[in-house]
Image: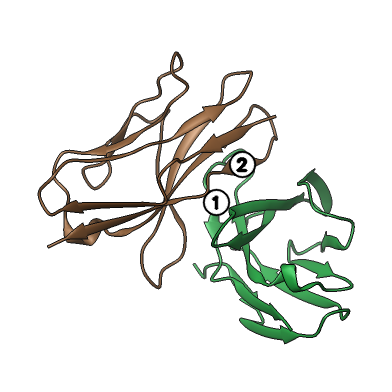
Amino acid sequence: KAGVTQTPRYLIKTRGQQVTLSCSPISGHRSVSWYQQTPGQGLQFLFEYFSETQRNKGNFPGRFSGRQFSNSRSEMNVSTLELGDSALYLCASSLDGRDYEQYFGPGTRLTVT
Amino acid sequence: AQRVTQPEKLLSVFKGAPVELKCNYSYSGSPELFWYVQYSRQRLQLLLRHISRESIKGFTADLNKGETSFHLKKPFAQEEDSAMYYCALKGGGYQKVTFGTGTKLQVIP
């Protein structure tokens, strides 16, 4: 079974631009969560989607948004990028009822200059 | 609010020495606690959960509700244990999983 995939793997953007990151979960997994990973803050929860609905949301500004499609693939969007948004963005998928066991993707490394 | 605290950013031990990675949590209800591990150049993965009460790769963790702790222990460290370890908490129902900031374990040969 293929693992969680994320595209692109690396991205360089300029302040003020917007970016869209994509995540394809493991087949059969309907829950997708997004995290921001930085050296100082560790993993910070952004949001979780289940069956195209946002089920949980972290404490990030409205510039961060996401969505999930009917095939469970998910995207997250960051508008008006700031230098502080530079981070590794991780996506994780899980089976319904087993959301404690999250399968992580390799991440997208976003650098904002 | 749920919170997970890992007080050590880096823990260095010699091979064969005991390991204890500390984790304290804050949660008003009955949480589920987990340890995730990330080896070099690999993805973050679940190591163990407190409900299963199992030993994985020689690691164990006991949930102490009185001290609100879930420390990860191993009696004899191996070089292959060197990795980043994250403690995580999940509240009841469909609540999110909250991760600690992680502890880097370095096993010195």
Identity of the residue drawn at 55% across and 51% down? A102
- For label 1, the residue is A102
Pointer 2 residue:
B97
| Chain letter tied to brown | B
Q: Which subunit holds the residue at mark 2? A: B
Identify which residue is drawn at 63% across, 64% down.
A25
Q: Quadrant of residue A82?
A: bottom right
Image vertical order of residue A6 relative to residue B10, above or below: below
Furthest toward the top, the residue is: B66
Chain identity of mark 1: A
Q: Is A101 placed above or below A106 here?
A: above
| Residue type at the position of mark 2 | Val
Q: Which chain is green?
A: A
Foreground residue among B88 and A73: B88
Measure the alpha-carbon separation of dots 1 and 2. 9 Å
Q: Which mark is residue B31?
A: none
Q: Position of residue A23 (x, y in %)?
A: 68, 69
Dot 1: what SS?
loop
Vertical order, B64 against A75 (above or below): above
